[in-house]
Image (cartoon, helix red, strand yellow):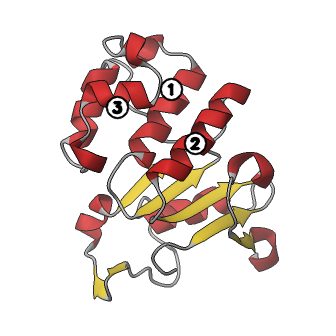
Amino acid sequence: MNSGERLALLGGNGSGKSTLLKVFSGYLTPTEGLIVWRMDQKPIAIQNIHTHISLCAPYQSPFPTFTLRENFEFYASFKKMQGDLSAIAFAEKIELSHAIDKPLSAFSSGMMQRVKLGLALLSDAPLLLLDEPTSHLDKNAVNWYHHLLLSASPNKTIVIATNEVEKEVPFETQNLFIQDYRA
């Protein structure tokens, strides 16, 4: 993919969308073939890929015993945030200011999804990988997600794995139907 492109990975449950995102992110090593990450035509070493990729996925989990503030500060210690965002500004952007000093174990699943989406969308990484981004979000939170996605990532390369494209993809994309490529 080229910088700024947007791709929707489409397919039913078990089609391999999440697995493909795990391979793209470096979370999984492919059993065949090779993934080469490049920035400005220069290869990126696997140990540095985390600075170039942000991921939000159901299998990923912030630290439940840490507060929202502590989770943000930990995350921001190894991934640059947009505009040197502070923990307070982050909590405001994800509409959870009232819970900044609560442990994530006290959060609802929708609140937790806001945290995960906020960390991914508001990072300064040029590649954004989203796996079922609206899971656990109510209608108002889906609207919040659309607004944040559109405002926080105008120049990012974005890959969204979904089987609900109308709900999770608020812009034009190239579509890749995973079941079309299964062996």
Residue 71 can be seen in this image: no
Is residue 110 shown left or right of residue 106?
Answer: right
Mark 1–mark 3 distance (CA, rounded to whole Å)? 14 Å
> What residue is rendered at 68% in x and 68% in y?
173
Query: Residue type at mark 1?
Result: Met
Query: Residue type at mark 2?
Result: His
Element class at badge 1: helix
Residue 7 screen position, x and y as percent? 63, 69
Element class at badge 3: helix
- Residue that label 1 marks: 112
Q: Quadrant of residue 21?
A: bottom right
**Vertical side of 134 occupied by 39: above or below:** below
* Numbered label attached to residue 90: 3
Label 2 or label 1, whichever comes before in sequence order? 1
Say few, some or many: other residues with alpha carbon within 10 Å of mark 3 (under 14 / 14 to 19 / 20 or more). many
Image quarter where the C terminus lies is bottom right
Q: Quadrant of residue 77?
A: top left
- Residue that label 2 marks: 147
Residue 48 screen position, x and y as percent? 24, 66
